[in-house]
Every structure is written in C-alpha cells, then in structure tokens.
Amino acid sequence: MFTIPNQSSVPRAYTQFTSDSEGSRMVASSNRDRLVDCMEELVKYSIVMRPHFHLFGDRFSEREERRRKQEEEENKVVILEHGSKSSVVNGSS
C-alpha cells in the first residue's frame, strides 16, 4: 500500500456539487482544487509504479495460502496412491 501525502477530505460534500441539470460537477473552490491536486498525484504515482505492479500483487498471506493448498493436493495424491497400492496388494482392484 502507499499513501499520497496530500490527502483531502471535503466537509459536507453533498453541498459541494451543482445540480443534476447542470451536470452534477464539483463547485469551483479550494476544496475542488485540493481534490484535483490529490488525483493528479495519484495518477502520477500510478504511472511511475506501473512497471513494478507485480510487486504489489505478491503478498505473504496469498503465497502461504497457495502453499497450503498445494500441500493439501500433494497429500491427497499420496493418500490416493497409497490407497490404490493397498488394494493391489490385498488382491482387489
């Protein structure tokens, strides 16, 4: 995760927009300017980090979950193989 240092909140945001008939856009104000600044920073950061996106999708918890599932599958195969060998040894098929 990352944080953009220039975060913004808009007090009483529901009062900061034009009517639907006017396009429901944010009213020109310092709040709007600050919000646009934040969005520009987010876009720039996204562009800079795009080549490294794979690093953000590789999480420890997800690797552990994949490892556990793989172990479970391997254990199932071993159990099935062991069970079928027992059947052959006992004379059943």
Image (cartoon, helix red, strand yellow):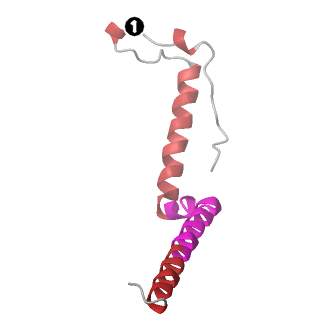
- Mostly what secondary structure, the magenta segment? helix
Q: Could you say where residue 41 lies in the image, as x and y percent from the top left? A: 55, 43
List the single residue furthest toward the left. 21
Q: Is residue 73 above or below residue 91?
A: above
Which residue is located at x 47 percent, y 63 percent?
51
Q: Secondary structure at mark 1?
A: loop
Classify 53 as above or below 24: below
At 60% from the left edge and 67% from the top edge, which residue is drawn?
68
Q: Is residue 19 left or right of residue 40?
A: left
Identity of the residue furthest to the front in this view:
91
Instruction: Relative to 13, say whether 91 is above or below.
Output: below
Of 88 and 31, which appears nearest the observer? Answer: 88
Question: Could you tell me residue 79's position as x and y percent?
Answer: 53, 78
Residue drawn at (43%, 90%) of the image: 91
Residues rendered magenta in the picture: 52-75
Query: Residue lying furthest right in this view?
Result: 5
Task: Give the residue type at disc 1.
Answer: Ser
Residue 16: where, in percent of width, then height? Answer: 52, 12
Q: Which residue is mark 1?
A: 19
Crowd band around label 1 with a 10 angstrom C-alpha radius: few (<14), some (14–19), many (20+): few
Figure quadrant of the C terminus: bottom left
Occupied quadrant, residue 38: top right
Residue 63 is a magenta residue = yes
Q: Nearer the viewer, residue 35 or 53?
A: 53
Q: Is residue 43 magenta?
A: no
